[in-house]
Structures are given as C-alpha cells and as structure tokens.
Amino acid sequence: MYGITTAFVIPLSISMNIYGIIFYYARTSSQRIAPSTSNTMTAHIPNARREMKLARNMLIIETLFTAAGTPLLILYLWQVMQPKSPPPESFYLLSLNSISLFITLMMVMLFYMNKDVKDIAFNYRHGARRHMHPVSTSNRREQMLQVTRY
C-alpha cells in the first residue's frame, strides 16, 4: 500500500491541489479586472474563454494522469484483497505499459494545446525558418569609427 500511495495517490492529490489553486487565482483575477473595464457582457467573454481553456487543459492532464495509474492501482488492490491468487502476468505488463502510454499521450496533448510551440514546430517543419545572416566585422568597425568621429 505504501507504493501506491507514494507513486500515485500523493502525486495526483498534489497536482490536483496545485491546479485548483491556479484555477482559483485565474478566476479571481479575471473577476477583479472585469468590474473596472465595463459592465457589459462582452467584456466577460474573453475571460470566460480563457477560463474554459484552462479548465479543459487541466481536466485533460488530470484525466490522463489518473488513467495512467489506474491499472497499477487495481493491481495493488488485487494483491491486497486476494494475496493467495495473484493477478495474471499480462496485467503486470498492461499496468506498466499504460503508464508509458498515457504519459506519452500527456506530452502529445501538452504539445497540441500549446499554440506557440505548435506554430514554431510546424513552421520549422514546413521550411518557414528565419535565416540569420552573419554581419561582417569590417562593417562593424567602420560603423564604430563613424560614431566616434561625430
């Protein structure tokens, strides 16, 4: 039971608490800003969209984290409840592979949800790279000499 508490329950509860605090502060900051702008409903729409996006992202991350640890949790509970009949060996493989699979999915979703990173990667992939041209040192010296002369 110590292993499941250390590996699954404590990290899940810590991340849920941290995301709850982040969501609370994002919500209260948008409520503080809203009265100073205007009383119209259109002023609240960007804040509501931002809060919905934040809640969606946090829900996806927590769902993937929970799904990754659930087979391992079931495996531990099986061993505690029925110590004389061990679970099938394939269930051990499933629980270990589920962690790798869902963590990979979490990284893919984080990449997909981050617009700036996604745009940079797609622009790099499609050849829209910024080319840096070297500046010659002789031109720089001439510019410095012109600046010092005046």
Image (tube, rainbow, N blue to C red):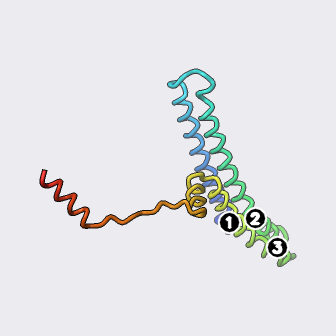
The amino acid type found where label 1 is placed reads Thr
Report the residue at 76% width, 70% height from top: 95
Camera-nearest label, 3 or 1:
1
Rate crowding at label 1 as few (under 14), some (14 to 19) or many (20 or more) other CA atoms within 10 Å: few
Q: Earlier in the sequence, mark 3 or mark 1?
A: 3
Report the residue at 60% width, 53% height from top: 114
Is 125 or 13 nearer to us in this picture? 125
Q: Secondary structure at mark 1?
A: helix
Residue that carries the numbered disc 3 in the rendered image: 91
Q: Position of residue 128 (x, y in %)?
A: 55, 59
Judged from this view, the residue extending furthest toward the bottom is 89
Rate crowding at label 3 as few (under 14), some (14 to 19) or many (20 or more) other CA atoms within 10 Å: some
Camera-nearest label, 2 or 1:
1
Is 119 or 92 nearer to us in this picture? 119
Q: Secondary structure at mark 3?
A: helix
Label 3 to label 1: alpha-carbon separation? 20 Å
Q: Position of residue 137 (x, y in %)?
A: 26, 67
Residue that carries the numbered disc 1 in the rendered image: 104
Q: Secondary structure at mark 2?
A: helix
